[in-house]
Image: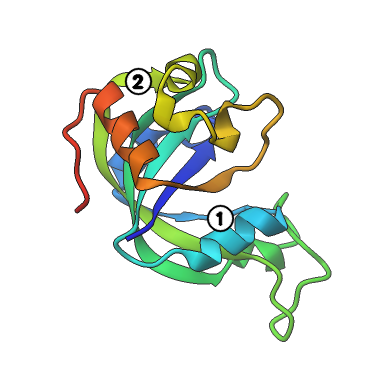
């Protein structure tokens, strides 16, 4: 099993929104490194749902990958802000995965909380200027975030 951190702005799509719909495509990723991470995900992988561009930025919950990477349909929609005219069925550029809500954190884990955790010392997330919206986590980072947020440690 792999562990991930996925960022979303809560005014665009929040963890509460994911809980309400139960399953949602994680689409609109337009960074090649983040896209490559999406393509590595497999059903059953766990992730942390991070609310970015809010004060304070924080981890709001745990999600599970429920469908492996497949073509992001927004790349073909001229009405979408994620439309990519260079993408075609023969030369797909962008992918998405489906995710489902697992559990909300009883207490949000803020970026400052993460900076205080020794397990997160080497994470790109705690460095200033990190803009990547999808990134891998170590199991130690994942479990430390669960503890900090008041959830029991889990690998399932």
The residue pinned by badge 2 equals 108
The residue carrying pointer 1 sits among few (fewer than 14), some (14 to 19) or many (20 or more) residues within 10 Å by Cα, namely: many
Q: Residue at point 42% right, 16% down?
A: 113
Q: Residue at point 54% right, 34% down?
A: 122
Q: Secondary structure at mark 1?
A: loop
Q: Which mark is residue 27?
A: 1
Q: Quadrant of residue 52?
A: top right
Is disc 1 in contact with disc 2, using a CB cutoff of under 8 Å?
no
Q: Residue at point 47% right, 62% down?
A: 97
| Residue 93 point in image, percent of width and height | 71, 70
Q: Quadrant of residue 30?
A: bottom right
Q: Is the residue 132 above or below the residue 32 in the image?
A: above
Residue in front for this viewpoint, 94 or 59:
59
Residue in front for this viewpoint, 38 or 82:
38
Q: Residue at point 44% right, 23% down?
A: 114
Q: Which mark is residue 117?
A: none
Measured Cα–Cα span from mark 1 to mark 2: 24 Å
Q: Is the residue 24 above or below the residue 40 in the image?
A: above
| Residue 139 point in image, percent of width and height | 34, 46
Q: Secondary structure at mark 2?
A: strand
Q: Is the residue 70 above or below the residue 125 in the image?
A: below
Residue in front for this viewpoint, 26 or 58:
58
Q: Is residue 86 left or right of residue 154?
A: right
Q: Quick one: which residue is furthest to the left in this view?
A: 152
Q: Is the residue 60 above or below the residue 5 in the image?
A: above
Dot 1 or dot 2, earlier in sequence: 1
Colouring scheme applied when the structure was drawn: rainbow
């Amino acid at each position: 099993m792999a562990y991930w951190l996925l960022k979303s702005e809560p005014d665009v799509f929040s963890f509460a929104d994911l809980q309400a719909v139960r399953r949602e495509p994680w689409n609109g990723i337009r960074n090649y490194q983040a896209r490559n991470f999406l393509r590595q995900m497999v059903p059953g992988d766990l992730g942390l749902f991070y609310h970015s561009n809010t004060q304070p930025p924080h981890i709001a919950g745990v999600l599970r990958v429920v469908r492996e990477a497949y073509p992001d349909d927004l790349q073909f929609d001229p009405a979408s802000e994620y439309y990519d005219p260079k993408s075609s069925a023969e030369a797909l550029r962008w992918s998405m995965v489906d995710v489902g809500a697992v559990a909300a954190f009883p207490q949000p884990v803020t970026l400052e909380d993460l900076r205080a955790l020794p397990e997160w010392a080497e994470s790109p997330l705690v460095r200033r200027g990190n803009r990547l919206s999808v990134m891998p986590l170590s199991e130690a980072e994942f479990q430390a975030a669960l503890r900090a947020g008041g959830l029991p440690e889990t690998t399932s």
